[in-house]
Image (spheres, helix red, strand yellow):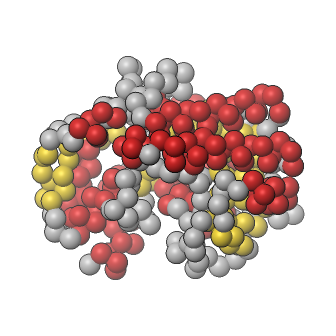
Amino acid sequence: MTRRALVLGAGGFLGSHLSRRLVRDGWDVTAVARRPADRIVDIVGDLRLVTGDATDRALLDRLVPAMDAVFPLAGRSGATRSMDEPLADAAANAMGQLVVLEALRHHNRDARVVFPGSRLQYGRPMVFPVREDHPQQPTSVYALHKMLGEQYHLLYAERHGIATCCLRISNPYGPAQDRPDQAFGVVGTFLARAAAGEDVAVFGGGRQRRDYVYVDDLVDLLLLAVTHPAAPGEVFNAGGPTVTTVREMAEAVVRVVGRGRVVDVPWPDAEAAVETGDYFGDLRRSRDVLGWVPQIELDEGLAATWATLTPALT
């Protein structure tokens, strides 16, 4: 029997990769995007594209009942932007999740769900690697709303039996993350700047450590989280296989592209206010419970990402 999945935010970076993988794996996919989605129009297979708003309750009431899995990936990214536009961030990242959960509560409590949380929920970590039981101390409205969205999901799991799993995602990157005008996607931004021969600017020396996770690894985890019997009601970190500094990542980008140079710039006040410092997650729960281990090292992932961006950026 064909499984049916609803992907909200399918026109975005993660949603487009997930939609493509679901179709490839034989799922019947309904992909919701707010505008015609360039990233997914070429998907061949059982994909139905719906142009609409993922916070539209009437739309969700119509789509949710037929689904075996729901991926509420729609939202707004950008910690700094969230401080300037907190109401818009709340509508997308907090209320948007509540709308999904209410549709599930009323129409389909049997569907499996995965919530895409953020490593920013932890704030400024006190111990490393960061485990799932680390206190959550958000430094931005974006992180606060991600934490609230997660709490909605866990509450609905406990009170209404919704089979939801929550991921706290580190720094994802990969093909199609190529919009340097947006407030997120640092790897894509660095690649675009290097391709143009521009300086790749890192704040404060780029000493912050990160565990960048390649999108294919992350999609693997999303599929495990929506199918594994032990996933509902649980929280898992989602990060990359290797810890590296922002400067090291920027230098790797310059090597892959063959242009550009890494320069240090002072921290802008807005970015400094929400910066969390070092972060790399403890991935043992994801491994021990779900069997997930990220496979793609940074150099390999950057080369694969650059290979797809080259025609558009050169």
Q: Horizontally, is 282 left or right of 305 in the view?
A: right
Give the quadrant of residue 115.
Answer: top right
Q: Horizontally, is 35 left or right of 310 in the view?
A: right
Q: Please tell me which residue is depicted at 23% across the width and 52% down the height of the picture.
A: 250
Q: Position of residue 298 (x, y in %)?
A: 35, 52
In the foreground, 211 or 100: 100
Where is 188 relative to 156, above or below? below
Q: Horizontally, is 131 left or right of 234 in the view?
A: left
Q: Can residue 210 be seen at all in this image of the molecule?
A: yes
Q: Quadrant of the C terminus?
A: bottom left
Q: Position of residue 60 (x, y in %)?
A: 76, 56
Q: How many marks?
A: 0
Q: Position of residue 107 (x, y in %)?
A: 87, 49
Q: Please tell me which residue is depicted at 38% across the width and 52% down the height of the picture.
A: 184
Q: Quadrant of the N terminus?
A: bottom right
In the foreground, 41 or 214: 41
Where is 121 relative to 312, above or below? above
Q: Position of residue 215 (x, y in %)?
A: 49, 56
Q: Please tell me which residue is depicted at 83% across the width and 33% down the height of the picture.
A: 160
Q: Horizontally, is 306 left or right of 9 in the view?
A: left
Q: Can residue 242 be seen at all in this image of the molecule?
A: no
Q: Please tell me which residue is depicted at 39% across the width and 44% down the height of the picture.
A: 84
